[in-house]
């Protein structure tokens, strides 16, 4: 399968198997991108890297962070710049550094990119930045297009760095819970990916969660995973006998392709997590509805009874831009508990279209895309690229790199 045929398959998926194919029917014109690819092929200039660049641009039209072309054989797919930034004003502040030879330190600020000020680069790359406000812009993929940056150190000194690509930085799963003062425990969950770690955390934290007066849950960097993992935690942070009602319905797009791709992924998951009832129900629904198109998710009741158990009187959940997918879901559910206050900044916003599948092509290329849709989008209530809003908003400033402003505010609210 050559690259043009792969592009045609990607277009076919986005128009027939992607769960946003009806709502976003007119969001993109694939012929514009096919012409670019065809022209390059005729000139014998259609490299794998150029192919991915053009396809990425096509997929950006759908404004869905759950959609993406992966290239397992290329650094262009799974890479790191060796650091991460956050925009404040007209500067990109370095908030994390993973590679020493970047020459950067936390607190440094990028003030020019290839000789252009930050605001001009942002203006030209609004599509790649998803038209987000300064605080919510994600800059990795934009910076990767450029060669150098002018940096201002905290002492005012200015110097230039060359941008390089490194092996992707993968944050290790973190599941912790410990006392931070006599009356308050801090739980940190940076994903919901590992059932065993979550089960172990809940087991060893049972006494602490039962007896502590206050609980702060940090999901600011929660990259998501499986919603089923956080349900045992709800027993401690909701009142007893609380009826949790779903606000909107979820519909799955059942096509032959989606059956094949989802079944492969879920079967792999069940090899290591046999007995996960929620996932087994997904598999059963795939078999039952194979090829039937959009079908209402009818797994269980739209109401969930939280029996509850003795737990903290007050709960703070700290959220931020980097909390997404199942992190979004957890934050959204927490909004419904009278015991919980959400503090920080709006979450990522990437749950309107979910339950991702992967179509595998040849030689390491594959497309990830969602297969379910929340009908909230039909009522103008979707949260994609908006996020779950905090009850107490704390603007991000460079001061956050010096101290944990969110945690300090959370303690003050208890």
Image (cartoon, helix red, strand yellow):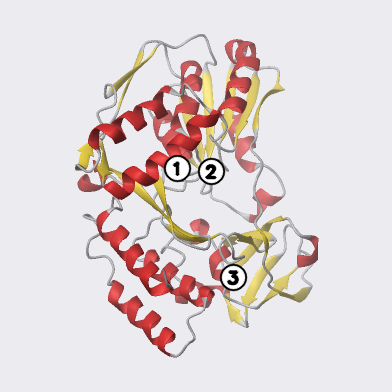
User: Which secondary structure, mark 1?
Assistant: loop
N-terminal of the pair, mark 2 or mark 3, is: 3
Q: Which residue is mark 1?
A: 325
User: Which secondary structure, mark 3?
Assistant: loop
> Which residue is most to the front?
1
What's the distance in space between the residues labelled 2 and 3, CA to CA?
22 Å
Q: Is residue 300 above or below residue 113?
A: above
Q: Which residue is mark 2?
A: 223
Can residue 353 be seen in the rendering of this structure? Answer: no
* Residue 366 vs residue 333, the one in the foreground: 366
Can residue 134 be seen in the rendering of this structure? Answer: yes
Q: Which residue is mark 3?
A: 144
N-terminal of the pair, mark 3 or mark 1, is: 3
Q: Residue at x 38, y 87 (%)?
A: 39
* Residue 325 vs residue 343, the one in the foreground: 325
What's the distance in space between the residues labelled 3 and 1, CA to CA?
24 Å
Q: Is residue 316 above or below residue 350?
A: above
Q: Is residue 157 above or below residue 411?
A: below
What's the distance in space between the residues labelled 1 and 2, CA to CA?
7 Å
Disc 1 crowd, CA 10 A, few/some/many (<14, 14-19, 20+)? many
N-terminal of the pair, mark 1 or mark 2, is: 2
Q: Say which quadrant the C terminus sits in.
A: top right
């Amino acid at each position: 399968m050559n690259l043009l045929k792969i592009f045609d398959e990607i277009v076919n998926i986005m128009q027939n198997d992607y769960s946003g194919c009806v709502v976003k029917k007119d969001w993109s014109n694939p012929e514009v991108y096919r012409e670019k690819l065809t022209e390059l092929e005729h000139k014998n200039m259609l490299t794998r890297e150029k192919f991915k660049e053009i396809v990425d641009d096509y997929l950006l039209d759908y404004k869905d962070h759950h959609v993406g072309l992966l290239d397992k054989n290329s650094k262009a797919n799974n890479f790191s710049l060796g650091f991460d930034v956050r925009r404040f004003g007209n500067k990109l502040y370095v908030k994390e550094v993973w590679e020493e030879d970047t020459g950067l330190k936390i607190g440094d600020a990028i003030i020019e990119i290839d000789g252009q000020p930050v605001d001009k680069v942002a203006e030209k790359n609004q599509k790649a930045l998803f038209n987000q406000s300064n605080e919510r812009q994600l800059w990795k993929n934009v910076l990767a297009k450029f060669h150098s940056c002018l940096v201002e150190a905290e002492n005012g000194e200015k110097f230039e760095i060359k941008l390089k690509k490194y092996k992707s930085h993968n944050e290790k799963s973190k599941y912790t819970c410990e006392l931070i003062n006599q009356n308050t425990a801090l739980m940190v969950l940076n994903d919901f990916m590992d059932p065993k770690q979550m089960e172990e955390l809940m087991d060893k934290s049972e006494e602490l969660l039962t007896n502590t007066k206050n609980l702060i849950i940090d999901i600011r960097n929660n990259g998501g995973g499986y919603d089923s993992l956080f349900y045992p935690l709800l027993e401690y942070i909701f009142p007893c006998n609380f009826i949790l009602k779903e606000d909107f319905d979820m519909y799955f797009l059942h096509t032959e392709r989606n059956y094949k791709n989802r079944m492969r992924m879920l079967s792999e998951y069940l090899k290591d997590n046999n007995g996960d009832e929620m996932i087994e129900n997904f598999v059963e629904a795939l078999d039952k509805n194979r090829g039937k198109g959009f079908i209402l998710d009818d797994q269980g009741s739209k109401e969930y009874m939280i029996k509850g158990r003795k737990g903290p009187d007050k709960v703070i959940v700290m959220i931020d831009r980097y909390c997404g997918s199942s992190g979004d879901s957890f934050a959204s559910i927490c909004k419904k508990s009278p015991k919980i206050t959400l503090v920080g900044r709006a979450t990522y916003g990437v749950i309107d279209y979910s339950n991702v599948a992967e179509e595998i092509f040849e030689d390491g290329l594959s497309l990830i895309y969602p297969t379910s849709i929340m009908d909230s989008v039909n009522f103008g209530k979707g949260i994609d690229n908006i996020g779950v809003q905090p009850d107490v908003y704390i603007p991000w400033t460079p001061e956050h790199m010096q101290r944990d402003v969110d945690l300090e505010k959370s303690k003050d609210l208890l």
